[in-house]
Image (tube, helix red, strand yellow):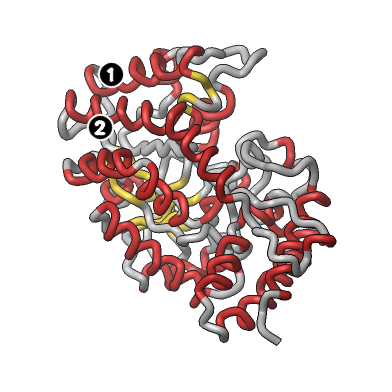
């Protein structure tokens, strides 16, 4: 869930206007909790109690959302912690602010991961073992660093172009590093749940539990990884449309009758019989079904200029040891700010732009650059 930037114009620069609309963000978070996250987590918790040891899933979130849940909806974190204690859920490692630091400063990426690890341990008692970068990005030369950091596996995007036509229902590994399994998202099935489930005009919608179950690969070496935003349940697809009924029916079919079983990512990456060979990506690959790569975040001149300006400001801010200024810079480093500057065909991707507050890339760029300019004016001269 991306942050909520305030509208900042040239006339606001230097005036002390807040760079983020915190009240609006908290309200949006609470609305999402009420409509989606609370009923979805409640449903999963009830199924986990009914079928002990059978239902398993993973979560990841930005540090900011976890902090706000701790303040405003601690009962949701308590429920997830109880599920973790019962072995039903594990948390994935991800950079605290969801930045693209891996693309320009590996030391900074490690520091973000360390902060997120500490937060997960404090709030949830969790010790992440599998990595998930923003956009489920994958860059094969990073494999040795990821392995050295102690991760047992790496969850990556499963766009068809990224896998070069190979099955998303298998494990892969970076070249010359079979010790680090890569767990690809099954893009088609994940988007059936998140994007197409009840879409008007879709020939299979609203999708039935039996049909979806029949689509899941069932070979002895197949491993299907479904990855989607939890807000698809109850927010994108409202409860009145039957999404929770579908979810209940499908999960109960699998838990009662299914020949397949649910596994945690840390369990999945130990299935060495599912390893299907090396996967090379010298340029970062991400999860969008439109195209492999990072063009959605750094593909046009606006994004490249904004990315460079953000990076240039970091050292000046960190030399000051001012936590308030550092916090503002960290919030601006969220990769969604760059994503919102993307142009066609990215803006047609409903998943990527479901939370975008701007009408187009230029509006997003101008607001972001005004935010950066205002932040720079706050530095002591």
In this view of the protein, which residue sits in the foreground, 11 or 120? 11
Disc 2 marks which residue? 55
Which residue does the image show at 73% across and 36% down from the upper left? 348
Q: Can you tell which quarter of the image residue 17 is in?
A: bottom right
Q: Is residue 273 visible?
A: no
Counting from the top left corner in percent of width and height, residue 307 is at 70, 66
C-alpha span from label 1 to label 2: 10 Å
Do labels 1 and 2 touch, CB within 8 Å?
no
Q: Is residue 345 above or below residue 144?
A: above
Disc 1 marks which residue? 252
Which residue does the image show at 42% across and 66% down from the upper left? 113
Q: Residue 62 carries which label?
A: none
Q: Can you tell which quarter of the image residue 116 is in?
A: bottom left
Which residue does the image show at 41% across and 26% down from the upper left? 216
Q: Which of marks 1 and 2 is nearer the N terminus?
A: 2
Counting from the top left corner in percent of width and height, residue 95 is at 47, 61
In this view of the protein, which residue sits in the foreground, 225 or 251? 251
In this view of the protein, which residue sits in the foreground, 65 or 209? 65
Could you tell me how many numbered marks the image carries?
A: 2
Q: In this view, does 310 lie above or below 269?
A: below
Counting from the top left corner in percent of width and height, residue 354 is at 63, 36
* Label 2 residue SS: loop
Q: Is residue 160 visible?
A: yes
In this view of the protein, which residue sits in the foreground, 271 or 339? 339
What crowding class fits label 2: few (fewer than 14 Cα within 10 Å), some (14-19), or many (20 or more)?
Answer: many
Counting from the top left corner in percent of width and height, residue 322 is at 53, 78
What crowding class fits label 1: few (fewer than 14 Cα within 10 Å), some (14-19), or many (20 or more)?
Answer: some
Q: Is residue 59 rendered to the left or right of residue 380?
A: left
* Label 1 residue SS: helix
Quadrant into which the C terminus falls: bottom right
């Amino acid at each position: 869930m991306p942050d909520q930037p305030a509208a900042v114009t040239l006339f606001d620069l230097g005036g002390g206007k807040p760079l983020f609309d915190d009240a609006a963000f908290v309200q949006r978070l609470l609305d999402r909790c009420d409509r989606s996250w609370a009923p979805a987590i409640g449903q999963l918790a009830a199924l986990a109690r009914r079928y002990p040891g059978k239902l398993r899933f993973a979560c990841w979130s930005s540090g900011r959302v976890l902090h706000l849940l701790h303040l405003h909806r601690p009962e949701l974190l308590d429920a997830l912690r109880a599920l973790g204690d019962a072995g039903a859920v594990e948390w994935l490692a991800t950079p605290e602010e969801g930045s693209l630091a891996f693309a320009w400063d590996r030391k900074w990426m490690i520091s973000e991961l360390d902060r997120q690890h500490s937060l997960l341990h404090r709030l949830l008692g969790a010790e992440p073992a599998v990595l998930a970068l923003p956009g489920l990005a994958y860059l094969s030369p990073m494999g040795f660093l990821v392995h050295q950091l102690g991760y047992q596996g790496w969850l990556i995007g499963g766009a068809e172009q990224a896998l070069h036509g190979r099955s998303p229902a298998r494990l892969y590994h970076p070249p010359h590093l079979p010790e680090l399994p890569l767990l690809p998202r099954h893009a088609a099935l994940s988007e059936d749940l998140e994007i197409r489930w009840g879409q008007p005009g879709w020939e299979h919608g609203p999708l039935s539990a039996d049909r979806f179950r029949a689509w899941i690969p069932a070979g002895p070496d197949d491993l299907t990884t479904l990855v989607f935003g939890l807000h698809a349940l109850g927010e994108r697809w409202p409860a009145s449309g039957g999404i929770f009924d579908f979810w209940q029916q499908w999960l109960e079919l699998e838990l009662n009758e299914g020949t397949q079983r649910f596994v945690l990512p840390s369990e999945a990456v130990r299935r060495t019989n599912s390893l299907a060979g090396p996967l090379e990506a010298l340029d970062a690959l991400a999860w969008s079904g439109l195209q492999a790569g990072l063009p959605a975040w750094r593909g046009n001149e606006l994004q490249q200029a904004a990315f460079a300006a953000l990076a240039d400001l970091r050292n000046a801010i960190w030399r000051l040891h001012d936590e308030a200024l550092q916090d503002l810079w960290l919030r601006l480093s969220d990769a969604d700010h760059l994503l919102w500057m993307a142009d066609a065909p990215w803006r047609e991707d409903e998943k990527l732009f479901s939370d975008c507050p701007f009408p187009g890339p230029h509006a997003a760029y101008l607001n972001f650059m005004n935010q950066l300019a205002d932040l720079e004016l706050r530095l002591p001269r």
